[in-house]
Image (spheres, rainbow, N blue to C red):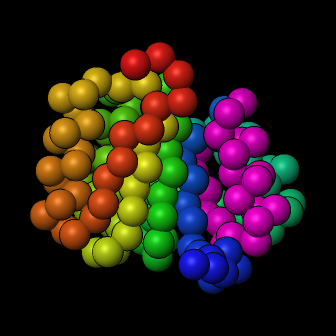
Amino acid sequence: MSINFAKTRVAFIGLGVMGNSMAGHLLTAGCQLSLFTRTASKAKNLIDRGAIWRDTPAAAVENADVVFSIVGDPSDVEAIYLNDPGIISALPSGSVAVDMTTSSPTLARRIADAGSKKNIQVLDAPVSGG
């Protein structure tokens, strides 16, 4: 199967050391990239390369096929995914959400359950820790 990355609409939430680098690789692959991070200046290098800044996580994901998130801690994960408006409420049906924050299994299940009600596939994929 061949993937046309130029047609893949990706949102990236959280642009710390790891997130910024990961988002940069998605741009290099040709993805259409929308971004949100609490500190907007952390997105400048990616915006200069063609990424689009959004003011909220919900705005970043509203047209996405895939969203990746890597934020500070479980309370941040809960806020961006489950608050209204949040990622689950704004992400289109049929899309995929991948959270890479080291979080709790209970929270991951809550997000997956909320996503399944909208036909959103949710993956818990922490990059370190648990």
Residue 76 location (% of width, % of height): 39, 32
Relative to 32, does residue 58 appear above or below in the rendering? Answer: above
- The residue depicted at 86 percent of the width and 60 percent of the height is 48
State the image quarter where residue 2 is shown.
Answer: bottom right
- The residue depicted at 19 percent of the width and 39 percent of the height is 109
Relative to 8, does residue 71 appear above or below in the rendering? Answer: above
Q: Residue furthest front?
A: 1
Residue 93 location (% of width, % of height): 28, 75
Q: Residue furthest top?
A: 129
Q: Is residue 54 visible?
A: no
Q: Is residue 87 visible?
A: yes
Figure disc tally: 0
Relative to 50, does residue 42 appear above or below in the rendering? Answer: above
Q: Is residue 21 magenta?
A: yes
Q: Is residue 130 magenta?
A: no
- The residue depicted at 18 percent of the width and 29 percent of the height is 106
State the image quarter where residue 99 is shown.
Answer: top left
State the image quarter where residue 7 is shown.
Answer: bottom right
124 and 60: which one is in front?
124
Q: Is residue 24 left or right of residue 101?
A: right
Residue stretch rendered in magenta on the structure: 17-37
Q: Is residue 73 left or right of residue 26?
A: left
Please state, as top left, top right, bottom left or bottom right, where the C terminus lies in the image.
Answer: top left
Q: Is residue 114 left or right of residue 50?
A: left
Please state, as top left, top right, bottom left or bottom right, where the N terminus lies in the image.
Answer: bottom right
19 and 45: which one is in front?
19
Q: Is residue 122 left or right of residue 128?
A: left
Relative to 26, does residue 63 appear above or below in the rendering? Answer: below
